[in-house]
Image: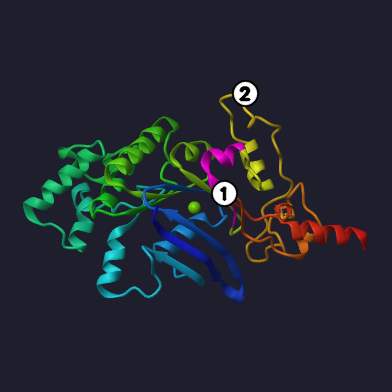
């Protein structure tokens, strides 16, 4: 399967007042296969939204390379940039804040059609109506304003707007987090249906692990600007390797009490440290129940330790364990 998106050692640092540098995203590498949904999870502030925004070029990467369809996105210009801006779309957490309150829903949905000169007049109107129907709304909604809609309907409008320009790749940044639980499944089901019908690829950003399992083929886990683990969804839930993933999963309610997943709830000590001054070595070490001396000395490497199962933790690195033995012997 084609890798539609590839990230290699991507960093996004922000310089604040007094020269302080926030290491929001640090050395992240992963790829997304065409047609899949890659879930990206982690607590708020872990950098997952920054990853999404850097991929779609709302932010410029501080370092590293991002390739879309085999081409570096850094130097895109002219027609190629326009094409990229059409092929990659984003859906936001708060659909209300991202919809212009003074524009009709029809004009909001057609914005991309106008920008990319894809349709006008009657054809534009028909496309809008088509899109409204595709997301479960109807023609009469086209002439109303965003405030007249519920949260779930507004997210449908956001989806229709993204779909208007025929994208290949959609970054969904917590698209259901602001919605009632009863509405969440409807929006996720709509997204799954659209994916099947249109061959879309999703990067699905979430802080909630229960819904993300349902939609994702593979899931990446972030902590304090690092990607710490990535695996196929079922594998991640059955065999979490990273101590942070274990803790996250232990907090998810499990429908089947006999399953292997229902262990003790792991309560992490302390708070997430500041990304301005992250811990040396492994960034999770100040809270890790399994931390060793070597964890403060070196950052663990990002390794594929089983087929398609990546983790960055010294527990899974022979040479780190050897070093720890030596530490102990001293
Ligand atoms: Fe814990 Fe060390 Fe693994 Fe980090 S590298 S998660 S501190 S065991
Ligand atoms: Mg966010």
Q: Is residue 190 visible in this depiction of the protein?
A: yes
- The label shown at residue 264 is none
- Nearest to the observer: residue 166 or residue 107: 166
Sequence-earlier tag: 1 or 2: 2
In this rendering, the answer to whether 294 lies above or below 60 is: above
Left or right of 276 in this view: 65: left
Query: Who's the residue at 39% across and 49% down the image?
Result: 202
Q: How is the image coloured?
A: rainbow
- Nearest to the observer: residue 165 or residue 318: 318
Q: Position of residue 188 (x, y in %)?
A: 38, 38
In this rendering, the answer to whether 18 lies above or below 163 is: below
Q: Quadrant of residue 330?
A: bottom right
Q: Position of residue 10 (x, y in %)?
A: 52, 66
Query: Who's the residue at 52% across and 41% down the image?
Result: 233
Residue on which disc 2 sits: 257
- Find the magenta span and give its range: 227-238
Q: Position of residue 184 (x, y in %)?
A: 41, 35
Q: Position of residue 299 (x, y in %)?
A: 69, 63
Q: Is residue 58 visible in this depiction of the protein?
A: no
Q: Quadrant of residue 52?
A: bottom left
Q: Which residue in the rendered view is the most extreme toward the right?
A: 330
Left or right of 122 in this view: 79: right
| Secondary structure at numbered mark 1 | loop
Q: Quadrant of residue 324?
A: bottom right
Residue on which disc 1 sits: 307
Query: How many residues crowd mark 2 within 10 Å: few (<14), some (14–19), many (20+)?
Result: few
Q: Which residue in the rendered view is the most extreme toward the left?
A: 122
Q: Judge: label 1 CB < 8 Å from ligand 1.
A: no
- Nearest to the observer: residue 134 or residue 150: 134
Instruction: Say whether residue 129 is magenta.
Output: no
């Amino acid at each position: 399967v084609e890798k539609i998106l590839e990230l290699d050692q991507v960093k996004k640092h922000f310089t604040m007042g007094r020269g302080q540098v926030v290491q929001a995203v640090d050395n992240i590498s992963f790829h997304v296969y065409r047609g899949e949904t890659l879930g990206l999870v982690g607590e708020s502030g872990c950098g997952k939204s920054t990853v999404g925004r850097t991929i779609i070029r709302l932010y410029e990467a501080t370092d590293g390379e991002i390739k879309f369809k085999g081409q570096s996105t850094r130097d895109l210009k002219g027609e190629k940039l326009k094409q990229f801006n059409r092929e990659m779309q984003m859906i936001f957490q708060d659909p209300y804040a991202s919809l212009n309150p003074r524009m009709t829903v029809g004009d909001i949905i057609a914005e991309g059609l106008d920008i990319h000169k894809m349709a006008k007049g009657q054809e534009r109107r028909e496309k809008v109506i088509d899109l409204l129907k595709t997301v479960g709304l109807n023609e009469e909604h086209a002439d109303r304003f965003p405030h007249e809609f519920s949260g779930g309907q507004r997210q449908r409008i956001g989806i229709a707007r993204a779909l208007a320009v025929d994208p290949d790749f959609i970054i969904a940044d917590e698209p259901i987090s602001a919605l009632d639980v009863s509405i969440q499944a409807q929006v996720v089901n709509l997204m799954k249906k659209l994916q099947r019908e249109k061959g879309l690829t999703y990067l699905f950003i979430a802080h909630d692990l229960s819904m993300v399992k349902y939609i994702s083929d593979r899931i990446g886990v972030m902590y304090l600007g690092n990607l710490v683990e990535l695996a196929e969804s079922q594998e991640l839930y059955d065999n979490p390797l990273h101590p942070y993933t274990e803790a996250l999963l232990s907090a998810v309610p499990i429908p089947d009490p006999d399953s292997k997943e229902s262990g003790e709830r792991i309560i992490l000590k302390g708070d997430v440290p500041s990304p301005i001054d992250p811990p040396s070595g492994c960034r999770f070490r100040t809270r890790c129940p399994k931390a060793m001396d070597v964890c403060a000395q070196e950052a663990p490497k990002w390794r594929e330790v089983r087929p398609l199962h990546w983790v960055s933790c010294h527990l899974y690195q022979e040479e780190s364990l050897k070093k720890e033995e030596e530490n102990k012997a001293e």
